[in-house]
Image (tube, helix red, strand yellow):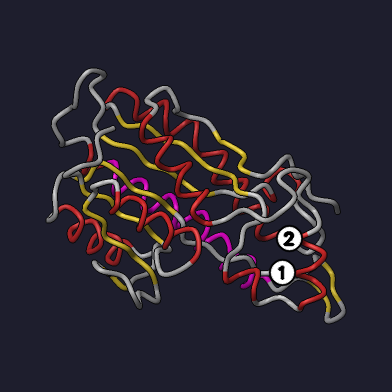
Amino acid sequence: MELTGAAALVTGAGSGLGAATARALAQAGAQVVGMDLNATGLDHAILGDVASETDVTAALDAASALGPLRLVVNCAGIAPAARVVGRNGAHDLALFERALRVNLLGTFNVLRLAAARMQALDATQPDGERGLVVNTASIAAEDGQVGQCAYAASKAGVIGLTLPAARELARSGIRVVTIAPGLFETPMLSGLPEAAQAAIRALPPFPARLGRPEEFAAMVLAICANPLLNGTTLRLDSALRLPP
């Protein structure tokens, strides 16, 4: 996919993986719009909720005004932690629902609305590609830890929709690929206690460190460049398998 002159929408672009991706795409020549509930520091920013049709439509309008909308990267997400049955009783159902709403429903909402627009674009040569949607899951979808039921379930849903969406949209020349990152240096991690951070940093086998947001962004660029990547989920995790 040629990024120069194309428009891209990145959700969750206010920090972490989304912010790094938005920067990398802009440096590669794309016209990038970032969507987040906190858009401080973004050049082309849209405040909004990924689970809102109105907000996502506004973000897609803003991106489409800059060029043909060829790329959408879904990075918006939350990671609430709670046990099925904790000290205060059963898992809060509203918390579980919120995780599903942001991580899964929000991802699908952006995907469906973006794909509808991409279908109307002229196909590019040599393969007739019209667009690409990159979603963000997590290795927790496959090896979720205690206290991650809501998060793991929501991210497993993202993996589950990847192949059927790619199969359906293939006739329109639209690819769908998901990245399942492992442990990365993000604001989500920095909010944990020091002891918890130290334990997490010791987990990745090799490289024996946390991932950098720029490495996630590099994977997005690699997916853009390789048209054979479609309908699959790529673990980006230093061979890490999370313990219980």
Q: Is residue 128 above or below residue 115?
A: above
Q: Which amino acid, mark 1?
A: Ala
Task: Locate residue 202, reporting x and y percent.
Answer: 81, 57
Q: Is residue 191 above or below residue 22?
A: below
| Camera sees residue 51 | no
Secondary structure of the residue carrying tag 2 is: loop
Q: Say which residue appears at 87% left-offset and 79% top-offset.
A: 87
Which of the image's four quarters has the N terminus?
top left
Q: Say which residue appears at 23% left-offset and 39% top-offset.
A: 118
Instruction: Point out the tag, 1 or 2, that comes first from the N-terminus.
Output: 1
**Furthest-bottom residue in this view:** 88
Q: Is residue 163 left or right of residue 22?
A: right
Q: Say which residue appears at 16% left-offset and 36% top-offset.
A: 120
In the rendered structure, which segment of residues is drawn in magenta? 93-115
- Between 62 and 222, the one lying in front of the other is 222
Task: Locate residue 222, reporting x and y percent.
Answer: 43, 35
- Between 96 and 1, the one lying in front of the other is 1
Say the numbered circle drawn on residue 81.
1
Q: Which amino acid, mark 2?
A: Gln
Q: Say which residue appears at 23% left-offset and 22% top-offset.
A: 128
Tell me the quarter of the picture where residue 230 sits.
top left
Secondary structure of the residue carrying tag 1 is: loop
Magenta-span inclusion, residue 106: yes
| Camera sees residue 193 | yes
State the residue position of label 2.
Answer: 148
Task: Locate residue 183, reporting x and y percent.
Answer: 67, 55
Magenta-span inclusion, residue 187: no
Q: Is residue 188 left or right of residue 35?
A: right
